[in-house]
Image (tube, rainbow, N blue to C red):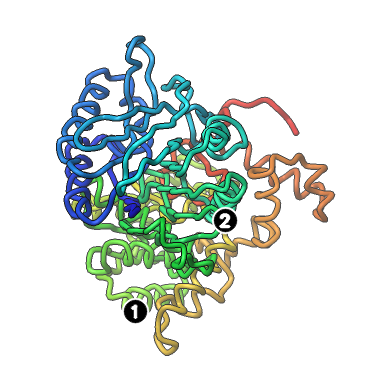
């Protein structure tokens, strides 16, 4: 029996485009296979969020399923879509449909509705009760197939355990499982344990592509009844793979599609950035190039995503900018083949100083002047982006965003933030990784950019270390607090000064108002700012 695993990249709400993509896949493979499996909610994309509150949207999804069924002659197809309950029209389900020979053979409704981190399925869906088992004829034999959706297979409970106990010959799980660093291997290990414990072959088809801040990695697999991976599709790639489930001689216990941690993370950022541009109708980007490591990594990610010729860098030196910063920024742009322009901000800065100084006491002895420089740059960046019909990139990382080391309407101005969910030390690691993809004599990111002490260069001889602890130390404190929800005493017990920990935690708490105004960016951890971590801006709790 031959099965095609179709991990496709769909766009939320694009019912016509998604339907056409599914039909094209069916046409291209129906003569070569018995069964084609598509991801969870492949009709409408994931997550459709409040589109699900529009009844016409749900009806249109059902009409799309009917259209697809007309193209399923001599082949079976499994795919996901949202549907109203047949007898209770106010109840909505996250469903999987099995179509064969142009007829709907079975509809299964998802049982386990995740309601944590980025998931809000209980807001929209009602849990199903169908056992998900169906008898169909495939390759001239009667096959008992058990179908589940994403979360249903993560736990040793119904419905998948029930399907195995009732003699399922094949388990199919369609999924829209978002990416986070380290999650792919954990997910596949779980699937291998399921197949081995049930002694039943398993097809797992996961969505691929970027959707706003979410990344779907694909990494779909076919696993035999012994728990061995028969094939694994590439991560972050739109791909269809045919597997012969009866040919166990082709079992591959070595997975050739695995990536290093840095390669996996980098590819996820590039794919999400590309999809954000393509799916929203943009083809150009603008960003400020400071000569620092954050803008450098943001630039190369975007160049790799949409082409360097479509990314414009603005070098906006002030009187505090060092010569090497301008030189490093120019070197980066030249290495990548990016168009770039130098626009000094000092003339504009002087005008602001002249007009504002009479209003302020000690004007140059506080943050006002530093923020003003950042906002002048933000205005220039936005002007160029508007003129080019481009998206302005924000270049801040998670470490600095966490503690408020950013300027509203300055470096935070923009429409997309490629490294928003990367801690500073991850930024360094990915810069080193990206340089391994270039020749040694011409690295993408200049060595000086990576090696020099980070600085905002908004006052004389400024360094980040003037305001923040060493980033290696800061990142550990932030991860313990934000990701692991540890309190100050617990974090200090890990080997950090308690007064420092309390200062950092306070900075995180008081800067929530900034983060809730920040641009979206790829979510690559299990606890990103935004959908994952939802904290009140007005917050009187004192740690």
Compared to 7, does 456 lie above or below?
below
- Asked whether residue 142 is in view, the answer is yes
Task: Give the label on residue 335, or none.
Answer: 1
Name the residue located 26 percent from the left edge and 34 percent from the top edge.
13
Image coordinates for residue 284, horizontal then vertical, percent:
23, 57
Q: Residue 37 sits in which quadrant? A: top left
- Which residue has dot 2 on it? 226
Which one is nearer the viewer's eye here, 258 or 480? 258
Rendered location of residue 405, percent (x, y): 55, 50
Where 437 falls versus 370 (above or below)? below
First-in-chain label (2 vs 1): 2
Q: Nearer the viewer, mark 2 or mark 1?
A: 2
484 left or right of 278? right
Instruction: Say which element carries label 2.
Output: loop
What distance separates the C-alpha of mark 2 from that of mark 1?
49 Å
x 52%, y 63%: residue = 427
Q: Are marks 2 and 1 in contact (CB under 8 Å)?
A: no
Disc 1, SS: helix
Q: How many marks?
A: 2
* Residue at figure coordinates x 43%, y 49% from the top left: 203
Q: Is residue 31 above or below residue 177?
A: below
Left or right, residue 208 beside residue 148: left
């Amino acid at each position: 029996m031959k099965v095609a695993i179709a991990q496709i990249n769909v766009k939320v709400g694009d019912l016509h485009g998604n339907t056409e993509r599914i039909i094209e896949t069916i046409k291209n493979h129906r003569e070569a296979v018995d069964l084609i499996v598509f991801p969870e909610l492949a009709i409408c994309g994931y997550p459709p969020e409040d589109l699900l509150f529009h009844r016409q949207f749900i009806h249109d999804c059902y009409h799309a399923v009917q259209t697809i069924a007309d193209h399923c002659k001599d082949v079976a197809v499994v795919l996901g879509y949202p549907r109203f309950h047949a007898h209770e029209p106010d109840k909505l389900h996250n469903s999987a449909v099995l179509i064969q020979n142009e007829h709907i053979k079975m509809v299964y409704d998802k049982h386990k509705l995740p309601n944590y981190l980025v998931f809000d399925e209980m807001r929209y869906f009602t849990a199903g009760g169908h056992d998900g088992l169906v008898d169909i004829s495939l390759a001239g034999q009667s096959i008992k197939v058990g179908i589940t959706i994403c979360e249903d297979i993560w736990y040793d409970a119904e419905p998948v355990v029930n399907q195995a106990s009732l003699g399922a010959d094949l388990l199919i799980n369609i999924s829209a499982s978002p990416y986070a660093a380290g999650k792919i291997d954990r997910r596949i290990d779980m699937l291998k344990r399921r197949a081995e414990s049930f002694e039943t072959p398993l097809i797992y088809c996961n969505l691929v592509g970027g959707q706003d801040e979410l990344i779907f990695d694909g990494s779909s697999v076919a696993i035999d009844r012994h728990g061995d991976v028969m094939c694994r599709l590439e991560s972050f790639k739109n791909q269809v793979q045919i597997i012969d489930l009866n040919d166990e001689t082709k079992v591959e216990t070595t997975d050739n599609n695995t990536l290093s941690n840095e390669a996996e993370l980098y590819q996820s950022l590039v794919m999400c950035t590309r999809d954000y541009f393509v799916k929203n109708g943009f083809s150009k980007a603008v960003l400020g190039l400071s000569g620092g490591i954050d803008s450098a990594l943001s630039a190369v990610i975007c160049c790799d995503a949409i082409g360097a010729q479509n990314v414009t860098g603005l070098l906006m030196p002030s009187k505090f900018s060092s010569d090497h910063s301008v030189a490093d920024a120019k070197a980066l742009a030249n290495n990548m083949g990016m168009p770039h322009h130098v626009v000094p901000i000092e003339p504009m800065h002087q005008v602001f100083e002249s007009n504002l100084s009479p209003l302020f006491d000690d004007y140059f002895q506080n943050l006002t002047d530093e923020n003003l420089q950042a906002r002048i740059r933000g205005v220039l960046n936005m002007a160029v982006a508007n003129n080019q019909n481009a998206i302005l990139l924000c270049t801040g990382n998670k470490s600095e965003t966490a503690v408020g080391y950013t300027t509203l309407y300055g470096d935070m101005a923009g429409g997309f933030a490629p490294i928003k969910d990367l801690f500073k030390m991850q930024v360094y690691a990915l810069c080193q990784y990206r340089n391994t993809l270039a020749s040694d004599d011409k690295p993408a990111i200049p060595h000086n950019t990576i090696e020099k002490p980070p600085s905002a260069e908004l006052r004389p001889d400024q360094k980040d270390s003037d305001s923040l602890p060493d980033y290696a130390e800061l990142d550990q404190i932030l991860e313990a607090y934000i990701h692991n929800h540890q309190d100050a005493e617990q974090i200090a017990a890990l080997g950090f000064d308690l007064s420092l920990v309390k200062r950092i935690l306070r900075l995180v708490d008081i800067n929530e108002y900034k983060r809730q105004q920040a641009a979206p960016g790829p979510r690559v951890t299990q606890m990103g700012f935004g959908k994952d971590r939802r904290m009140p801006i007005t917050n009187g709790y004192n740690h």
